[in-house]
Every structure is written in C-alpha cells, then in structure tokens.
Image (tube, grey):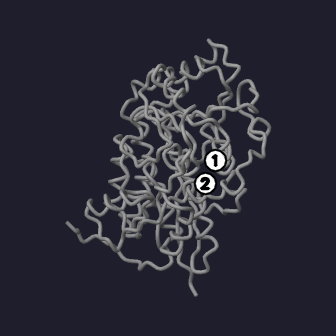
C-alpha cells in the first residue's frame, strides 16, 4: 500500500512544541509518511534552534529552508515571507507531498500556505479561527481562506472558521497538540533536571528551591515602536519583585532588536542577580519548568494554552493575546511596571483551576487519523 505523504512545515521554535505529538502520530501511522521541513527562525541558533530537539526526538528532517532576512523589522518580515515562497515551492516540487500542513499564525507560515495553494497541493491548517487583535490574526484568517482542511483547537475557533465561509465537512475541532504534551507533564510534574546545567544560558544562578517566576515576552508587530519601553516596564516590575526569574529570549519578530536591546541595557545598569536568561528548552522541559513555577509573565500564547491546562497562573501583558479563549488562570494587565507588579500580588491569592478549553490531550492522534482518512480534494466552494 502506498503511504500518503504528509509534509509538515515548522518555521519557528514554538511551532515544534505546538505539533510534536501530531508529528509522532503521523510518523507512527501505518498509512502515512512524514515529510518534515524546517524553515526560517526554527533553524537559527540565536533564537533557540529547534533542530537538535527535533533530531533528539527521533524525527528525520526532509528539507531545510534558510529564508530569514536579518533586520527584525517590518520590511525584513515581508521579504522573509517572499523568500520562503520561492524556496518552499522548490521543496514541494521535489518531495511532492499529498498534503501540506502549516501551523498557527506566524508571518512565515504565509509562505507555506501560498506555495501549497498555488501548486494545487491540499493544505491543512492547525490552530486556525483564533483571534488576537494583531498582525497574527490577519495571517491566521488569510491562511484559513487558503486552506482546504482546518484542525482547530477550540469550539469558538471552530465556529469562527465556519463563519469565515468554510464548509463544516472541512473543519474539525481536534484540540491543540500542545495540550497533549501538557497532559503528559501532569503524569510526572516533578522538576527532574537542573535548568542551569542542562541549558546553560546567561546570568547568575539564583536558588530556585523556594520558588521562581518565568518570563516570556515578545514584541508586538503592530506596536514595534513601543517594544523597548514595553520590555523595560516588565524588567522594572520583576526587578522590584526581587525573586528568582527565569527569562526566555524573544521570537524573531519586528521589534525583537529593541526588546533584546532593552534586556541587555538593563542587565548592564542594574543588579539582576535574581535573573537568568535562556534561549530555548525542549518542550517537555519547558512545560515542567512552568508547572513548578509561581507563574508566567509576558505575552506568549503558552500562557493562554498550556498554562490553562496546567493551572499555572499567568500575568498576560498588553494586546498580543487579545480576545483569545482563556481559562481562569489569566490576569490581564497593561504595559506599566505598576500594573504588572499589582498583577503579581494577585497571584498569591489565586486558586488553581485547570481548563480544557484547548482540548484534553488527544489532538495529535485526532489529526493523524484525519490526515489519513480525508479525501485529497479541495473545499473551495464558498459557503456564504
């Protein structure tokens, strides 16, 4: 029996953890052949390359696409997407997949969607239908209109994709594959590794035995001129708290230079012996680190998704996750040190409660089964 070739394109470090269980389920399925393409910032060490983790997990990389244009500004993002279209089209022509799978909403994913669509390759989109109120939302909804199959992560996302005009027989609420990882962490939540020893990083090594906070804050592409000020407000709030902080480097987005520059300048001017900085971690280790923390501060979607399931308190800053489905674990604050500090104080009285708004831990298997069973056809008749 000829196996159906499923090409999954990973363009950034968070996207790997978003689909790791789906990759494994595709790899293990007797009717499917996994073609894994790694592109864009997922290949770059300065942003925490995902390649070593991918290989360690036993996945073979079919092709690499180096398409990131340096600059970390809006022009570079647009040109990076254009280069991605050129390079991915060549890859797809060479490996001839039966279905291409693209993930979520980062700007690089547009290249995957456009290339597959113009080459008449059925396109499946994971995590469509969500809203955030920034450029990611435009990308996500654009990919929805290019995609043939939609594997959404929540009921409201399912409803929204239908309202966008997609046929019900092409939309499936599979849950989010990242919740599969979180479900596994709940079975063994112990922090069973030394993050300093295993991942290195930069800065002092504060004692974590009495608790610590995790910070992950990215620039907002529609607020690039505010990136430096926004990160400084968070730095001041966490410095004022004077408790151990494990800080993760930002994504390669417009404004990342300003965010990184703000962190470096603060490091040079303040005593930050309670801070330690990391580029990246294996998905399981990162979730275990979150599970054992006092909470997550920043604007990452991990606070909205995995932390909801793990019942980890989250101080969500600013507009990056606006309107996204969330559990009761999230406290929304503005980009001021006082607002952030006030949110931190509220966490002390927070009652932990898990939420399954993004699924219950079987999304990977759901997605693999659909990729095997769905017909190789296009759903482009408008359903308005």
Residue 287 circle label: 1
Q: Is residue 86 above or below residue 227?
A: below
Residue 146 falls in which quadrant of the image? bottom left
Q: Residue at x 55, y 50 (%)?
A: 306
Q: Residue at x 43, y 78 (%)?
A: 374
Residue 2 falls in which quadrant of the image? bottom right
List x then y, in percent, for residue 104: 45, 53
Residue 226 circle label: none
- Placement of the N terminus among the 4 image quadrants: bottom right
Query: Would you say residue 258 is visible in this rendering?
Result: no
List x then y, in percent, for residue 300: 50, 40
Q: Is residue 355 above or below residue 69?
A: below
Count of picture labels: 2
- Between residue 216 and residue 293, name the one nearer to us: 293
Q: Is residue 180 above or below residue 372?
A: above
List x then y, in percent, for residue 70: 51, 35
Query: Would you say residue 207 is visible in this rendering?
Result: yes
Label 2 sits on a secondary structure element that is helix
The mark nearer the N terminus, 2 or 1, is 2
Q: Is residue 338 left or right of residue 134?
A: right
- Between residue 379 and residue 360, name the one nearer to us: 360
Mark 2 touching mark 1, by CB under 8 A? yes
- Mark 1 crowd level (few <14, some 14–19, many ≥20, 10 Å Cα): many
Q: Is residue 204 above or below residue 73?
A: above
Farthest left residue in view: 384
Residue wearing tag 2: 182
């Amino acid at each position: 029996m000829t196996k159906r070739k499923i090409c999954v394109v990973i363009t950034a470090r968070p996207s790997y953890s978003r689909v790791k269980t789906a990759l494994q389920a595709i790899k293990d399925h007797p009717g499917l052949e996994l073609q894994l393409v790694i592109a864009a910032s997922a290949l770059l060490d300065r942003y925490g390359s995902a390649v070593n983790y991918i290989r360690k997990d036993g996945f073979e990389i079919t092709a690499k696409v180096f398409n990131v244009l340096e600059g970390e500004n809006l022009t570079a993002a647009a040109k990076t997407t254009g280069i991605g279209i050129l390079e991915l089209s060549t890859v797809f022509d060479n490996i001839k997949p039966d279905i291409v799978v693209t993930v979520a909403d980062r700007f690089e994913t547009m290249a995957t969607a456009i290339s597959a669509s113009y080459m008449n390759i059925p396109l499946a989109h994971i995590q469509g239908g969500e809203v955030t109120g920034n450029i990611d939302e435009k990308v996500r909804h654009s990919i929805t209109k290019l995609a043939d199959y939609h594997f959404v992560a929540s009921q409201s996302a399912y409803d929204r994709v239908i309202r966008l005009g997609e046929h019900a027989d092409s939309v499936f609420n599979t849950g989010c594959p990242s919740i599969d990882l979180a479900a596994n962490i709940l079975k063994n939540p112990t922090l069973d590794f030394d993050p300093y020893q295993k991942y290195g990083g930069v800065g002092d090594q504060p004692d974590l035995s009495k608790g610590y906070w995790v910070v992950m804050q990215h620039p907002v592409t529609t607020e690039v001129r505010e990136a430096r000020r926004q990160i400084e407000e968070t730095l001041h709030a966490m410095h004022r708290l004077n408790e151990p902080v494990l800080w993760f480097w930002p994504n390669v987005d417009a404004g990342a230079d300003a965010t990184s520059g703000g962190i470096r300048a603060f490091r040079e001017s303040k005593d930050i012996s309670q801070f330690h900085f990391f580029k990246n971690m294996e998905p399981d280790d990162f979730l275990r680190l979150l599970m054992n923390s006092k909470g997550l501060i920043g604007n990452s979607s991990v606070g909205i998704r995995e932390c909801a399931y793990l019942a980890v308190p989250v101080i969500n800053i600013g507009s990056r996750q606006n309107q996204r489905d969330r559990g009761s674990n999230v406290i929304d604050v503005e980009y001021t040190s006082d607002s952030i500090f006030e949110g931190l104080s509220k966490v002390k009285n927070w009652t932990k409660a898990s939420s399954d708004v993004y699924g219950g831990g079987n999304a990977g298997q759901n997605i693999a089964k659909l990729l095997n069973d769905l017909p190789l056809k296009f759903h482009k008749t408008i359903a308005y």
